[in-house]
Image (cartoon, rainbow, N blue to C red):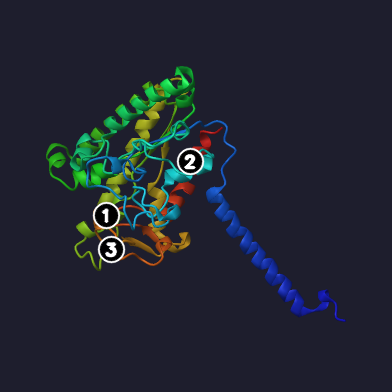
Amino acid sequence: MMSLCCSSHWVAIIFLVHYLLILYTAETRSLKEQVSPLKNVSVSAIFVFGDSTVDSGNNNFLKTTFKSNFPPYGRRFPNHIATGRFTNGLLATDFVARYLGIKDYIPPYLDSTLSLDELKTGVSFASAGSGFDPLTAKLDGVLTMQMQVDNFKEYIRRMEYSIGKEAARKLINKAIFLCSAGTNDFMVNYYGLPFRRLTYPISGYQKFILHNVQLFIQGLLELGARNIVIAGLPPIGCVPAVITLNSYNALTNRGCIESLCTVAQDYNRMLQTTLADMRQMSHAGARVAYIDIYKPLDDIVKNPHQFGFEKVNVGCCGTGLLEASFACNPGSVVCMDDSKYVFWDAIHPTEAAYYSIFLCARHVIDSFLN
């Protein structure tokens, strides 16, 4: 009988099985990377502030038309639930919570059914349509950043009543605070309406927003926050709706609007300087970090296939040119494979894009664990 080691046929089979095992192991590792938490002992909770990129459903409980608690939103969320997240599944902040081993999803604070355990491990105070400019939130009838901070003050009072002042203080001190806002200030407010442009040149408006960022951070520090992460702006000129509204031929010329991307880059540089200055003056033991979301999205848009994407300048929902919120609804046509799209609707990234952003930002989260 021919020995297996001498048979070229069996050698080929063994090589093929070994190769498939390598592929299987790599794929399994990739999937586990999404769901396997760290053995986290240093972070007590995660608190989120900002706009639709991190709102997990607070707008469901507001008198605003800017909601997403209906299909096809939530298409990839467990049980296909449209939670009020402006995407097809999880947000980047949900991936952070999973990575830290805190919880699988970050619930909205305004959900009155949340248990004490859910509240203790963190919630989102964010409101879709909000921004650091109070006028931005008022345009959509949503929560301003100050209102979000006020809700956090209420949260602290509830915790002090439930677990005691000292336990509540330790909970806040050991929590991570994430904020993603500013896009609506420029994309919707400054460039969408004339009011702020009549008052400020773009450089002046950037400084106005940064002043409000400082006030926001200072407010959190005074309430006991010691670990704060602020996200910069994405390449706003690459958002499908922005391309549609600013391109001379939106159907054939769908490249990024570079002038608006430059505005975002300039703001991000100014933001990093502002945060560096605040770190020098902040409370003892406080850490204020910057997360760059511009480069990850810019890299994906410029080299989509390298990241597993195919469509970068249109959304998956409807025509993908302008639809968002109620314009992306149960009657809308939806793409077959949303994992190949960077954008879910014409404004907001897909779960797959949020996961890529999370991977790029993970080193910042790690720095708070050391």
Residue 147 image position (x, y, % from top left): 27, 31
Residue 172 image position (x, y, % from top left): 45, 26
Residue 206 shown left or right of residue 110 in the figure: left
- Residue 91, labelled with which disc? none
- Residue 332, labelled with which disc? 3
Q: Residue at left 48%, top 39%? A: 364
Mark 2: amino acid: Ala
Residues packed near mark 1 inside 10 Å, few (<14), some (14 to 19) or many (20 plus): many
Residue 192 or residue 108, whichever sits in front: 108
User: Residue 332 is drawn in which quadrant?
Assistant: bottom left
Residues packed near mark 3 inside 10 Å, few (<14), some (14 to 19) or many (20 plus): some
Q: Residue at left 30%, top 54%? A: 239
Name the mark nearer the viewer: 3 or 1: 3
Quarter of the picture containing the C terminus is top right
* Sequence-first tag of 3 and 1: 1
Q: Residue at left 38%, top 54%? A: 74
Mark 3: amino acid: Ser
Residue 123 or residue 357, whichever sits in front: 123
- Residue 324, labelled with which disc? 1
* Cα distance in 3D space between marks 2 and 1: 26 Å
Q: Secondary structure at mark 2?
A: helix
Residue 292 or residue 176, whichever sits in front: 176
Q: Residue at left 43%, top 49%? A: 357
